[in-house]
């Protein structure tokens, strides 16, 4: 199993769990759970593969990814009521999913010898778009757009770190580990310690 496949399996599972948790907050039925879980799980990777012209798209070539997402949805459907704070579970699971999905996108770009800026963008696309689709469909405030929080910034920093390590060391495996570590550290710091970036604040026009 290649690094891209292994990372895709991990990100599909964890992102599917987050999708199902959002579905529970929206009080959807079991089919709704499965739909949102699958959308979240494969959304970012699908856009990545389309942009990179990878044929077939990863979950079409291996439908087992969809089965994993559906099973995750079923598990959450019958267990979400046991969680004391589903939102807290959601944001922390999402942080782990981001830290796996960004390296998956970076790995896909590197394996196809894409230009370094493209590799960075593929990491961000894979990490951010599935969760964005999930939140928009379920009418939640997208985590990726939460004011000042490090989300897209964490994905960007992790992808850039991976590119730098790959160029310096020539070791793709080390680059992916650093990518995941940087991504999760920044996202976790934002959640646990309140790390923020300055946000734009409009000023009234002068006279």
Image: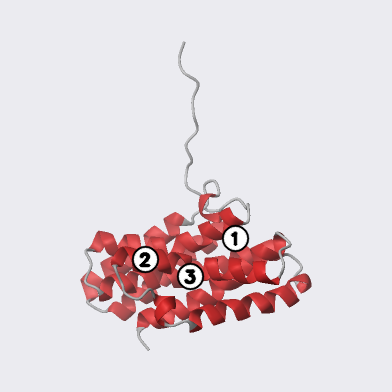
Q: CA distance from mark 1 to mark 2?
A: 30 Å
The residue sitting at 21% across, 71% down in the picture is 113
Q: Secondary structure at mark 1?
A: helix
The foreground one among 200 and 110 is 110
Q: Quadrant of the N terminus?
A: bottom left
Q: CA distance from mark 1 to mark 3?
A: 27 Å
**Disc 3 secondary structure class:** helix
Circle 1 or circle 2, nearest the eye: 2
Quarter assignment of residue 101: bottom left
Q: Quadrant of residue 47?
A: bottom left
CA neighbours of label 3 inside 10 A, class few (<14), some (14 to 19), many (20+): many
- Asked if residue 160 shows in the view, the reply is no
Question: How far from the left and from the top, in percent, is residue 27?
Answer: 74, 62
Query: Label 3, label 2: how many angstroms apart (C-alpha)?
Result: 10 Å
- Residue positioned 57% across, 72% down in the render: 16
Q: Work out whether residue 68 can be spotted.
A: yes
Q: Residue at x 47, y 42 (%)?
A: 198
Q: Which residue is mark 1?
A: 192
The foreground one among 186 and 5 is: 5
Q: Position of residue 173 (x, y in %)?
A: 32, 80
Q: Identify residue for label 3.
A: 42
In the rendering, at what x and y percent does residue 106 appear? 34, 69
Q: Which mark is residue 48?
A: 2
Neighbour tally class for label 1: few under 14, some 14-19, many 20 plus, Cα within 10 Å? few
């Amino acid at each position: 199993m290649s690094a891209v496949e292994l990372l895709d399996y991990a990100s599909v599972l964890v992102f599917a769990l987050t999708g199902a948790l959002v579905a529970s907050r929206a009080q959807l039925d079991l089919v709704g759970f499965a739909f949102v879980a699958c959308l979240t799980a494969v959304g970012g990777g699908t856009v990545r593969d389309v942009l990179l012209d990878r044929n077939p798209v990863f979950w079409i070539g291996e439908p087992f990814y969809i089965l994993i997402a559906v099973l995750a949805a079923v598990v959450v459907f019958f267990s979400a009521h046991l969680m004391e704070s589903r939102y807290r579970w959601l944001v922390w699971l999402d942080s782990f999913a981001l830290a796996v999905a960004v390296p998956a996108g970076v790995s896909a770009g590197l394996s196809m010898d894409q230009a370094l800026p493209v590799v960075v963008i593929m990491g961000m696309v894979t990490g951010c778009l599935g969760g964005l689709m999930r939140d928009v469909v379920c009418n939640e405030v997208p985590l990726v757009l939460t004011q000042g929080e490090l989300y897209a910034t964490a994905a960007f920093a992790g992808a850039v770190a991976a590119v730098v390590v790959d160029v310096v060391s020539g070791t793709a495996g080390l680059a992916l580990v650093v990518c995941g570590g940087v991504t999760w550290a920044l996202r976790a710091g934002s959640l646990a310690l309140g790390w923020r970036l300055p946000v734009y604040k409009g000023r009234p026009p002068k006279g």
